[in-house]
Image (cartoon, helix red, strand yellow):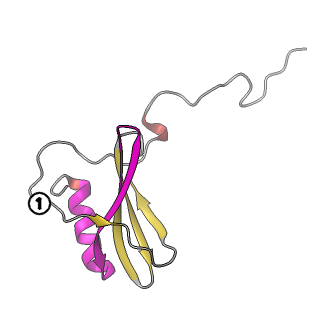
Amino acid sequence: MNETRPGDGVAAPPNDDRFHAVHVPGGPAYTELDWEPVRSGGAARVRSYTCDCRPTFYELCYGNGQAFIRRTRRTDGQTLVDECARGRPAKTMVVWFMLLSGEAT
């Protein structure tokens, strides 16, 4: 008897959007954000993120009572990480939604 179980013979998940996170829209943005090198200063928790299937992706982070957005860029074999909008969570969330809507970059 030949029984199959879930996962047998599956080498990779289906190639569709079921396994992707939010993508940041491409194209011109209205607001250019000021990105700075990553600060060392303790651990941060990632509260939300965009899909990392593209060369640039973003994380909404919280740490030390502040929120900030971390940007990771993979280019020419290097991984570059910087951040912006460090401060009160309410203000950082406004910038996060601008980023997700394509209004900022």
**Which image quarter: residue 63?**
bottom left
- Is residue 77 magenta-colored? yes
Q: Which residue is mark 1?
A: 31
- The local crowd at label 1, few if under 14, some if 14 to 19, many if 20 or more residues have their Cα within 10 Å, is few
Q: Position of residue 8 (x, y in %)?
A: 74, 25
Q: Position of residue 5 (x, y in %)?
A: 78, 28
In this rendering, position of residue 83 left or right of residue 10: left
Closer-to-camera residue (80/30): 80
Where residue 13 sits, quadrant-wise, is top right
- In the picture as drawn, the residue positioned furthest to the bottom comes out as 65
Residue at 47 percent across and 65 percent down: it is: 46
Identify the residue at horizontal 18%, vertical 63% (top origin): 33
The residue lying at 26 percent from left, 55 percent from top is 100
Residue 26 to residue 49: above or below: above
Q: Quadrant of the N terminus?
A: top right
- Point out the image quarter for the C terminus: bottom left
Position of 105 compared to 56: left or right? Answer: left
The residue positioned 15% from the left and 56% from the top of the image is 103
Whether residue 34 is in magenta: the answer is no
In the displayed structure, 40 sits above or below 17; it is: below
- The furthest residue to the right: 1
Q: Residue furthest top?
A: 1
Q: Which residues are magenta?
A: 71-100
Q: Report the front residue among 77 and 22.
A: 77
Furthest toward the left, the residue is 30
The amino acid marked with disc number 1 is Thr
Above-or-below relation of 80 to 47: above
Q: How many numbered discs?
A: 1
